[in-house]
Every structure is written in structure tokens, then in C-alpha cells.
Image (spheres, helix red, strand yellow):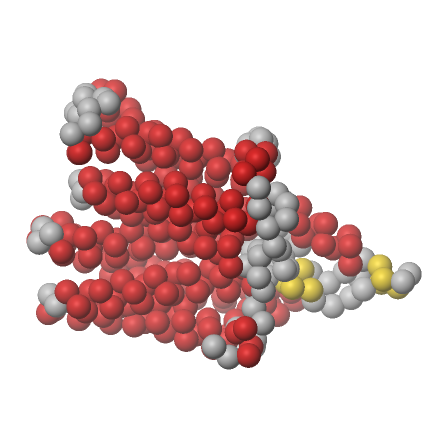
């Protein structure tokens, strides 16, 4: 690890995370004056780093794994997706918050907070997802194929859809951080969720030799990688033509402080290498190649959202 990468921020489990826009406003107010003088220039957000990035990553990955596994009718895949969200994402949030009771307080205002909506969606998804998947393991809570079971599936899918996208809305609700304040982020979250889910599902199907499902997942995987390349390119291009803070954040990703991590990890490993390995796997069927493709995808997935958090700059206070 380079000295530069070692300086990338750490989370502080001290209080309930405010909506991103509230954090920005609070930070801007705090920086408005120093010893009676106005403060100008760019200020990096330091509230969210490793733990929040991990929570975002696990939420999207688990949600995507469940959704894609439901598409290919894989009970074990759906169960793993539920557990990744219910245990992994929840644990990362709890570590950030520091105390269990703060977790519930964060879900108290769904009318105006995407954090609250997301936490509620996680709970609904966990409950209804487990009810839906139970018959695959011989536990009949609701008869498989019944109208009630189909209703449970609809609720599970609706709630997991929110789980996959809500982190993007949490970030985009921040006018003071232009890099985040874009409607592209929820779309990017959904696309990466489905890509991660397709990668894990493809690995699972390949190991269980389900050729038909694996074939459809190969097409999905490649299509989603191409879609992500387009979305990421459009996102960064848009930032270069946005406000000065958005442009400065984009510069830090392309040729500044985070360029090596973004271009090397998120773009090259996470997208280009993953695409090449996926195409190679389609032509050869070698499981080891697929494993490498999944690893490359997961590295890129975590890296891009971690860097989007760290590269967020507050607009200058004038």
C-alpha cells in the first residue's frame, strides 16, 4: 500500500449518519467562518469512508445476488443474498454507529430520509425474503406456488429493489457535494448490484453444472459490464461539465489523488479485466477463469463506490 492510499480516511462510529445533504450543510456552516474570516476553497467530506463503503457494497451485492438468483430459481443463491444484506450490511452500519440503539433511531423518519427508507426496506426484505425462500429448504411457511407465496415474492422483490438503489439516493440528496448530487448514482447502484449478483450467481451455477442458467447469466454478465462502462464514462464526463467542485472531484479521480485507484482498480480491474475474463470464460468454460472474473468484479465494485465517497468535495463557501 502506498503512503497516499494509507491516508484515505477512516470511519468514526460516533453518531447517527445524517442524510448526505444534511452532512454537507452542517459541514459548510462549520467552515463558513474562521476567526471572523470567510473560508474558501474545496473541502473533502470525512464522515463516510471504509465502513459506509462496506455497507454500500454488501447491500448492493446481497440485493443483486437475491434478485438474480430469483431469476434463475436458485434457493441457495437467494438465501446467501439475504444473509449478505441482513448480516453483512447491518453489521457494517452498526460498527459505524457504535451503539445498537442508534440503528433504530436512524430508521425513524422515512418520510424525508432515504437512510430510514433503506433501513426499513432491509428489514422488510429480510423477513419476506426468508419466507419466500423457506420452501426451497423444506420449511413451508407459505405454500410454494400459492397466491400468498406469489404476493410474498412481489414484496421481497420490491423491497430488495429499494435496497439496491437507496444508497445512490442517500448520496444524491446532497447539493453541497456535486459529485454525489446526480440522478446517475441510483442507476449506477442498480447496475452494479445486478452485475455483482450475476457474477456470484454465475459462479454458483457453474459449480453446480446448471448449463442453461449459466448460459443466460453469461449474457447478463457481459451486458451489465458494458452497461457499467457506459454509465461510469457518462457519469465522469458529466462531472467535468458540472460545477467547479464536481469538476475538481472528477479530476482527482482521473488524474489526481485517486487516479491510480480509480483507473487501475475501478476501471481497469473492475470493468476491463472483468469483461475480458468473462468473454474468455464463455469461450473456454474454465471455472478458474470465472473465479478470477468474479474477484475482479468485486474489487472494482468496492473500489468505485469507496472512491466516490472519498472524492466528494464540498462546494466552496463564498
Q: Is residue 52 left or right of residue 25?
A: left
Residue drawn where x is 71% and y is 50% of the image: 25
Q: Does 236 sit above or below residue 263?
A: above
Q: Nearer the viewer, residue 9 or 155?
A: 9
> Residue 180's x, y, as percent?
56, 56
Residue drawn where x is 8% and y is 54% of the image: 209
Q: Is residue 37 visible?
A: yes
Q: Is residue 132 left or right of residue 99?
A: left
Give the farthest residue toward the front.
99
Q: Is residue 101 left or right of residue 142?
A: right
Picture quadrant of residue 32: bottom right
Picture quadrant of residue 273: bottom left
Which part of the image, by quadrant, shows the C terminus? bottom right
Q: Is residue 71 visible?
A: no
Residue drawn where x is 45% and y is 46% of the image: 91
Q: Nearer the viewer, residue 22 or 14?
A: 14
Q: Nearer the viewer, residue 301 or 179?
A: 301
> Residue 153's x, y, as percent?
28, 30
Residue drawn where x is 45% and y is 43% of the image: 90
> Residue 232's x, y, as percent?
43, 63
Amino acid at each position: 500500500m502506498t503512503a497516499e492510499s494509507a491516508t484515505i480516511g477512516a470511519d468514526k462510529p460516533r453518531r447517527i449518519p445524517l442524510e448526505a445533504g444534511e452532512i454537507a450543510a452542517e459541514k459548510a456552516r462549520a467552515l463558513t467562518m474562521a476567526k471572523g474570516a470567510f473560508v474558501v476553497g474545496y473541502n473533502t467530506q470525512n464522515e463516510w469512508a471504509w465502513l459506509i463503503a462496506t455497507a454500500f457494497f454488501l447491500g448492493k451485492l446481497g440485493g443483486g445476488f437475491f434478485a438474480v438468483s430469483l431469476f434463475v430459481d436458485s434457493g441457495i443463491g437467494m438465501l446467501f443474498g439475504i444473509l449478505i444484506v441482513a448480516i453483512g450490511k447491518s453489521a457494517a452500519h452498526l460498527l459505524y454507529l457504535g451503539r445498537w440503539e442508534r440503528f433504530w433511531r436512524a430508521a425513524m423518519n422515512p418520510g424525508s430520509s432515504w437512510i430510514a427508507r433503506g433501513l426499513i426496506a432491509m428489514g422488510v426484505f429480510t423477513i419476506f425474503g426468508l419466507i419466500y425462500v423457506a420452501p426451497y429448504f423444506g420449511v413451508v411457511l407459505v405454500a410454494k406456488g400459492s397466491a400468498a407465496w406469489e404476493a410474498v415474492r412481489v414484496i421481497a422483490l420490491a423491497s430488495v429493489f429499494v435496497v439496491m438503489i437507496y444508497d445512490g439516493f442517500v448520496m444524491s440528496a446532497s447539493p453541497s457535494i456535486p459529485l454525489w448530487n446526480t440522478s446517475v448514482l441510483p442507476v449506477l447502484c442498480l447496475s452494479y448490484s445486478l452485475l455483482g449478483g450475476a457474477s456470484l450467481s454465475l459462479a454458483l451455477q457453474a459449480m453446480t453444472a446448471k448449463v442453461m442458467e449459466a448460459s443466460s447469466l453469461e449474457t447478463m454478465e457481459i451486458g451489465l459490464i458494458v452497461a457499467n462502462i457506459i454509465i461510469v464514462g457518462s457519469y465522469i464526463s458529466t462531472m467535468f461539465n458540472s460545477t467547479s467542485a464536481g469538476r475538481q472531484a472528477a479530476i482527482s479521480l482521473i488524474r489526481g489523488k485517486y487516479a491510480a485507484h480509480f483507473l487501475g482498480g475501478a476501471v481497469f480491474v473492475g470493468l476491463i479485466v472483468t469483461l475480458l475474463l468473462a468473454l474468455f470464460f464463455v469461450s473456454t468454460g474454465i471455472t478458474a477463469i470465472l473465479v478470477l472474473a468474479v474477484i475482479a468484479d468485486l474489487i472494482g465494485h468496492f473500489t468505485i463506490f469507496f472512491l466516490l465517497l472519498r472524492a466528494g468535495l464540498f462546494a466552496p463557501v463564498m
